[in-house]
């Protein structure tokens, strides 16, 4: 995120070494909402970006005043950290009930636009029993998009992001150790949504991968594919003059790519909104035979809400 990197109580690093982790700011979703609203001006997908700005606004409202939810299992969290495993493992916690409370709180906070498709999707989520909701969520966090209705993706994804960011900001991660070639989030195990190239102070020129679920950032070396770890013939494609500061790191070895947000080109940039505002780049890369493997939980592959 642009602006504050570390808040009091977050990961501290020695002066000679940049931090391995950057936690999201507590106004994360407000920043995303503001950025999406600005990017919507004159954008061909303006209605979609404004819809997601409202989604993020509701996320921030709940994050600021969260409902009472079951606490994390302290023993499981402690043992996960001791064994260098994600303390918020998505494939485990998504099967528990706690995050469902966040979903209901988000549904209450979200003001749906006058769109029959959106209203229908929200009602489908409201009326679904807990087992169905969890089955959809398991499919979403595991990338099995064919196993849930596409119209539900951004709304279910918003609730999941909200729950995991809420948990993340409560954790003491001072004992977390950096591991080389960390291609998935060290906090929750989810894949990255994008990369972000920092441009200030101690972090100048460093790349951090941004988690698609909890929004944690972790350091990952540059000029190395975060999908297959190849360093051979990586290319960086972008639209000339694009104001979003986004380039796609394209790997010929795995035929995949990951978008990178360069903050020196867009100092007020934010990774999720920049990703959604550059879907034309995804379309171009798809036409050239490259595959997107980085999920954005507010985006259903092949369409939107």
Image: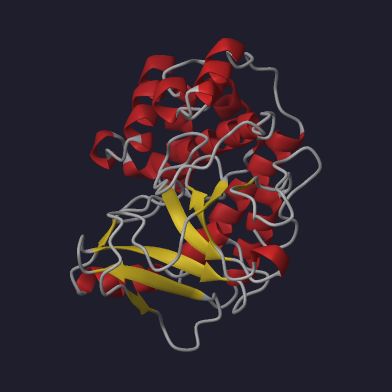
Indicate the quadrant where residue 101 lies.
top right
Q: Nearer the viewer, residue 87 or 109?
A: 87
The foreground one among 269 and 85 is 85
* Front residue of 10 and 212: 10
Residue 108 visible to an observer of this rendering? no
* Residue in the picture at 50% in, 88% down: 241
Q: Which residue: 28% across, 61% down?
A: 230
Instruction: Report the residue that reaches farthest toward the right.
Output: 8
> What colour scheme governs how the chains and residues are painted in the rendered image of this protein?
secondary structure
Q: Is residue 228 above or below residue 45?
A: above
Q: Quadrant of the N terminus?
A: bottom right
Indicate whether 72 appears above or below 299: above
Q: Residue furthest bottom?
A: 240
- Measured as percent of width and height from the top left, residue 299 is found at 41, 52
Q: Quadrant of residue 109?
A: top right
Horizontal relation, residue 17 to residue 138: left or right:
right
Residue 77 seen in the current view: yes
Q: Residue at x 59, y 48 (%)?
A: 20
Residue at the limit of the structure toward the front, as seen here: 16
Q: How many numbered dots are placed on residues in this image?
A: 0
Q: Measured from the top left, where is residue 286 in percent x and y? A: 24, 68
Residue 246 image offset from top left, x and y in percent: 48, 73
Q: Quadrant of residue 233?
A: bottom left
Residue 257 located left or right of residue 5: left
């Amino acid at each position: 995120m642009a602006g504050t990197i570390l808040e009091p109580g977050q990961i501290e690093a020695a002066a000679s070494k940049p931090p391995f982790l950057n936690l999201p700011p507590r106004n994360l979703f407000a920043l995303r909402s503001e950025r999406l609203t600005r990017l919507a001006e004159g954008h061909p997908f303006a209605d979609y970006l404004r819809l997601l700005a409202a989604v993020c606004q509701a996320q921030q409202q709940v994050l600021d005043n969260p409902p009472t939810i079951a606490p994390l299992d302290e023993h499981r969290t402690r043992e996960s950290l001791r064994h260098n495993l994600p303390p918020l493992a998505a494939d485990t916690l998504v099967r528990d009930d706690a995050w469902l409370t966040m979903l209901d709180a988000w549904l209450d906070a979200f003001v749906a636009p006058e769109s029959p498709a959106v209203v229908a999707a929200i009602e489908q989520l409201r009326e679904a029993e807990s087992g169905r909701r969890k089955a959809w969520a398991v499919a979403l966090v595991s990338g099995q998009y064919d196993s849930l209705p596409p119209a539900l993706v951004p709304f279910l994804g918003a609730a999941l992001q909200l729950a995991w960011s809420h948990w993340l900001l409560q954790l003491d991660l001072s004992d977390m150790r950096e591991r080389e070639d960390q291609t998935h989030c060290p906090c929750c195990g989810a894949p990255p949504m994008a990369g972000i190239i920092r441009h200030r102070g101690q972090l100048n020129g460093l790349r951090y991968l941004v988690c698609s679920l909890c929004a944690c950032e972790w350091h990952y070396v540059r000029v190395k594919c975060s999908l297959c770890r190849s360093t051979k013939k990586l290319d960086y494609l972008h639209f000339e003059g694009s104001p979003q500061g986004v380039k796609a790191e394209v790997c010929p070895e795995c035929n995949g790519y990951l978008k990178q947000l360069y903050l020196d080109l867009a100092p007020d940039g934010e990774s999720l909104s920049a990703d959604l505002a550059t879907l034309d780049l995804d379309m171009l890369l798809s036409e050239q035979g490259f595959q997107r493997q980085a999920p954005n939980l507010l985006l259903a592959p092949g369409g939107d809400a």
